Amino acid sequence: MKIGVLALQGAFIEHIKMLCQLGAQTAEVRLPNQLEGLDGLIIPGGESTTIGKLATSYGLIEPLRRFTRSRPTWGTCAGMIFLAKDIGIDEQPILASMDIRVDRNAFGRQIDSFETDLVIAGLKGKPFHAVFIRAPVVTAAADAVKALARLEDGRIVAARQEHLLATAFHPELTGDLRLHSYFCAIVKETMA
Ligand code: GLN
């Protein structure tokens, strides 16, 4: 199994380290031809405006859209924004692949970043310790989208639509491999 991590900006190295611990082959993706032969892709957190701009200048928008149509793709934080169909702003380049509406910086500024324990559907054991850094939330989702985790106030912070996964927080920063392992299972299912 070979999983790519979009490596334009943001926390891509941390995702690669987690995938390596799970025994997956990995590849950093900066150019369209680096998507060839990948079984799945992670789009990391960082800054979605920067990721969008760089993806546009490297000619990655259409190849990424095509990839996400059939291959498992997981967006974390800025990556979730980049995957979403609707972010309420027309000027910012996004893939518009997943049927979710996302509110950027839903909790305020850097100083309003926080950590909390989340119950996530499909993960066994203790709640998942989630780190939210200038995080987005899902404000609306199509019927095909399953909410996997919500904050206490009901807002969705993890969701899945078939082979697409989105999390508003940073699972690569805590050393808990369960979400990466969940994504690898989606990749395996899709390959079979
Ligand atoms: N606020 C950032 C954005 O809009 C996302 C922050 C993150 O990825 N930690 O892209």
Image (tube, rainbow, N blue to C red):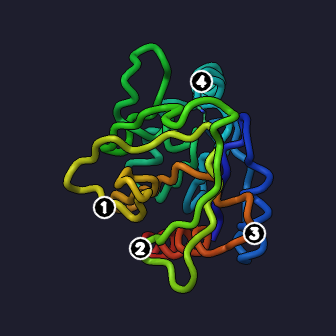
Please give the name of the residue rendered at 68% of the width and 37% of the height, measured from the top-left corner: 46
Determine which residue is flagged by label 2: 121
Q: Earlier in the sequence, mark 1 or mark 4?
A: 4
The foreground one among 57 and 13 is 13
Q: Relative to 25, does residue 10 appear above or below in the rendering?
A: above
Q: Which mark is residue 146?
A: 1
Q: Earlier in the sequence, mark 3 or mark 4?
A: 4
The foreground one among 41 and 74 is 74
Q: Circle 1 — which element?
A: strand
Q: Which mark is residue 49?
A: 4
| Mark 2 in CB contact with mark 3 (< 8 angstroms) | no
What amino acid does circle 1 point to? Answer: Lys
What is the x, y in percent for residue 131?
65, 54
What amino acid does circle 4 point to? Answer: Thr
| Mark 2 in CB contact with mark 4 (< 8 angstroms) | no
**Where is the N terminus found, in terms of image quarters?**
bottom right
| Mark 3 in CB contact with mark 4 (< 8 angstroms) | no
